[in-house]
Amino acid sequence: MNPPALAAHGLTKRFGDFTAVENVSFTLGPGEILGYVGPNGSGKTTTMRMVLGLLRPTVGRAELFGQDVAHAGDAIRQQVGYMSQRAALYDELTVRENLSFYAMAYGVRDSARIGEVLRQFDLQAVADAAAGALPIGWRQRLALAGALIHRPRLLILDEPTSGVDPVSRRSFWDRIYALAAQGVAALVTTHYLEEAEYCHRVGIMIRGSLLALDEPARLKRSTLPGAAWDIFAEPVLEALQELESDPSVVRAGLAGDHLRAITRAGAGTDELQARLTARGFRDVRQEPVEPSLEDVFLALAGEETSG
Amino acid sequence: MSRAIEAIGLSRAFGPTQALAGLDLAVDAGEMVALLGPDGAGKTTAMRLLAGVIRADSGSARLAGIDVAREAESARAHLGYVPQRFGLYGELTVWENLRFLAEVRGLAGRAWRDRAEAMLSFVGLEAFRDRRARALSGGMKQKLGLAAALIHEPQVLLLDEPTGGVDPLARQGFWRLLVRLLRQGVAILISTPYMDEAARCGRVGFLHQGRMLVEGTPTELRRPLQGRMIEVTGASPERFATWAVGVGGIEESQIFGAALRLRAASGLGEAVASDIEDAARQAGEIDVHARLVAPSLEDVFRFLLPTASHVVGA
């Protein structure tokens, strides 16, 4: 049985009186893609540092491929690749030179590997172009190629597809899924919940604690105390005001040409529709919708209690 | 009555690159419109042309009916503009930043003080008035940028990717502020690379390589894919490719997290979903469930963009 690519066992980090991370445990199996989301200051980055052995936990331990990161040598860290959307590329260097640089940094001596990666990532045509001149989708591919030059078995991806078009985003994820099918594990940190939707499982970190960790579909089914609705009503801004002051509504917001509301548990399926109609709004319709990961996130963050 | 924001055939090239090609756009008072597109699509160029910061090669832009190129000064009096890297002075405090920008806007005497107080409380930064701007979090900087842009009570607000690097909680608070501005009749044009943000706006224009690919309300944009997107859970992608091979009417199938996401041919959504479940049963795949899901804007734009369609297992 292969050990997990990454395992966190009760990780806790205190800085003086402040607990940045409290008792966080999770495992990331080979071939699994795990999203890790949380607001600024939620302990996300501190957790990342601990699991990569860059910061010593106050309590608990982290393992990479079955080895305690506190004692793991460089050989284990050689199994990890890192890629950020704000990619560490040298704009003045060519695509090939950037890859050579990554190869050097990761101690890859096999010179054929550069050509292999160029082919694998469809970068041959631009091999001698300056990285700075490439459109963002290509840069993103180059950054991923660089992170994979040493054939790591664990990839850390930091907001990998923010700001790219839907087609480039899809082809990026197809590559990640293909790597996953070969057993490469990926840990994705992001602020963007639409990016987290691409992960097999998503962990939500709030105020130092990992509050939920599950498949996106399950999080949507199980985390909200009530239900999510599309509400159509004219005029829409006034209808929003009405919903915001409705005691059965946890949260309401604009959803383009209509509204979206999260109601408390037990609220009726056409209650809001009846109320808005009675108040004289036109074209009123209430339809159940699947909650989004953002709904899940905001519910866990207790955003509604803080107003 | 003139539109709050209006662009007609707005074009601009930088060297050989046509950054924006013939943008037509109109936003009314109390309306929020999204310019959605990836990095490099022309969003910032559009914003800068509308703000009168750069000149158009051709076409025209009007704010509150005033041509931004011909009458720059009076057009700007109606404009609040928050560029991507807004001009905050890191060494100045929150309050000093507002004072400085009020002076630039020509607010004199007591007027600026009352307005600055009102804006501080509007964005919820009263407690931070003496903090240096550089010591603010990303979300707070964004709110200060908004307060500064609103100091002269503009009727038009241009927000260029205002939520970059801002976490979901802070973003939620920011959207609440925008809704309050809409209620006051401000016209808002917001640029974003994020589909879920654009989906909050009354209308969305999708910008691709300097051109507006499509424009409409989120509901209109989703309509062509309504009843055609199917989520399949409990199926491994590799096995799906073998047992679902006989199911017709699948235009596209892709891995999406722990599930598969399919696009059925027009009118075939229900039939494809039930055929998949039947095929799964016959293959002994008892955990497989297929159901119709609401199309996302991401589905829509991938559908519209020219692309090499990719089928799982192919």
Image (cartoon, coloured by chain):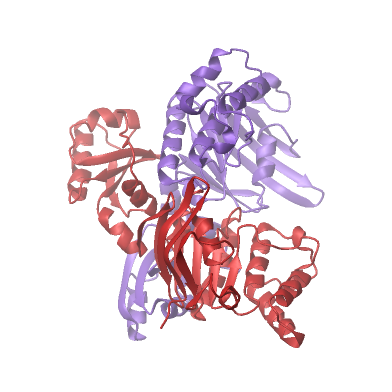
Chain colours: A purple, B red
Is B195 displayed left or right of B108 in the figure?
Answer: left
Name the residue located 67 percent from the left edge and 44 percent from the top edge: A45
Question: Where in the figure is residue B148, as x and y percent of width and height?
Answer: 67, 71
Q: Quadrant of the C terminus of chain B?
A: top left
- Residue at image x 32%, y 32%? B312
Q: Out of A148 and A239, give the one closest to the viewer.
A: A148
Quadrant of the image occupied by residue B204: bottom left
Q: Find residue B227 and report its horizontal and vertical position in percent.
A: 25, 54
Residue A223 vs residue B53, the one in the foreground: B53
Instruction: Indicate whether A48 appears above or below A41.
Output: above
Q: Foreground: B4 or A52?
A: B4
* Residue A78, above or below B27: above
Quadrant of the frame with the N terminus of chain B = bottom left
Q: Is residue A287 visible?
A: yes
- Residue A29's x, y, as percent? 51, 30
Could you tell me which residue is drawn at 48 percent across and 76 percent down? A244
**Residue B264 vertical position relative to residue B92 in the rendered view, above or below:** above
Residue B278 lies, with reference to residue B114, above or below; the image says above
Q: Is residue A227 left or right of residue B80?
A: left
Image x and y of residue A49, in percent: 69, 37
Residue A252 in sight? no
Question: Could you tell whether B205 is left or right of A299 in the image?
Answer: left
Task: Find residue B113 and report its image quarter.
Answer: bottom right
Q: Residue placed at 54% from the left, 31% from the top?
A: A142
